[in-house]
Image (cartoon, rainbow, N blue to C red):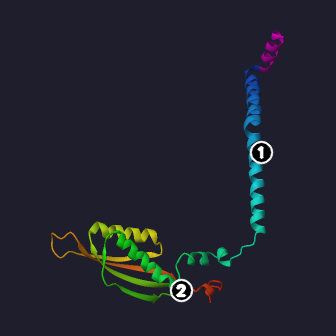
């Protein structure tokens, strides 16, 4: 048997032996790697098709969920939420032990979609406290923008600084009844 195998390998030559080895390697690779991957890909495609059919069969209850503009406008609080948003700012200032003085507040109409509520807050406290307050307000209220900060110290040795912080609170100009109406008129 061994003699027959050696004779057969001699007839194949070096190139034939290499080709036979590559053929065996390819068969092993196909059986252990490619076939299982194809099966997994087919299963994943079947799950994807099922999910697409399920989402297509489920009606979207809210037209705002389909309209990107309405989804964006839903991020901004309505004009009626101004007292709540101011209360949130005041709580953040209180958490930093800042003294709030008489503020200035005014509502500006920017367009059909957004309104801007300008807030000017005079504060008294330490520099680090003011920085922490501004950072917390901007982190907790993504629809709030910092317009300006002005620091003033009465004497060089004073620990507390008089600060004037100006914010813009962006609000949705649409009422809930307007949200179902088309944005472009």
Q: Is residue 9 magenta?
A: yes
Residue 20 visible within the image? yes
Residue 183 visible, this orientation: no
Indicate the position of residue 89 as horizontal and vertical percent values: 40, 76
Q: Residues within 10 Å of mark 1 (few under 14, many from 20)?
A: few
Which residues make up the magenta segment? 1-12
Across and down, in percent, residue 50 comes to 78, 59
The disc placed on residue 173 is 2
Quadrant showing the C terminus? bottom right
Q: Nearer the viewer, residue 77 or 50?
A: 77
Please determine whether, in this image, residue 106 is positioned above or below residue 124. below
Q: CA distance from mark 2 to mark 1?
A: 53 Å
Is 110 on the left or on the right of 48, as rendered?
left
Which residue does the image show at 74% across and 51% down from the upper left?
44
Residue highlighted by disc 1: 39
Check residue 123 for magenta coloring.
no
User: Residue 29 in the image: x percent, y percent?
Assistant: 73, 34
- Please give the label number shown on residue 133: none
Which picture quadrant has residue 4? Answer: top right
For the stretch drawn in magenta, the main secondary structure is helix
């Amino acid at each position: 048997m061994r003699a027959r195998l050696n004779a057969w390998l001699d007839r194949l030559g070096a190139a034939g032996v290499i080709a036979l080895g590559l053929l065996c390697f390819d068969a092993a690779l196909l059986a252990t790697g490619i076939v299982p991957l194809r099966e997994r890909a087919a299963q994943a495609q079947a799950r994807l098709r099922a999910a697409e059919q399920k989402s297509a069969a489920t009606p979207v209850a809210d037209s705002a969920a389909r309209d990107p503009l309405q989804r964006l406008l839903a991020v901004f609080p309505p004009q009626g939420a101004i007292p709540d948003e101011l209360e949130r700012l005041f709580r953040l200032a209180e958490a930093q032990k800042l003294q709030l003085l008489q503020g200035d507040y005014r509502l500006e109409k920017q367009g059909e979609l957004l309104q801007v509520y300008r807030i000017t807050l005079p504060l008294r406290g330490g520099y680090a406290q003011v920085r922490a307050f501004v950072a917390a307000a901007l982190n907790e209220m993504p629809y709030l923008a910092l317009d300006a900060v002005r620091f003033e110290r009465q004497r060089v040795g004073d620990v507390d600084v008089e600060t004037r912080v100006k914010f813009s609170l962006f609000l949705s100009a649409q009422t809930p009844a307007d949200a179902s109406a088309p944005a472009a008129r």
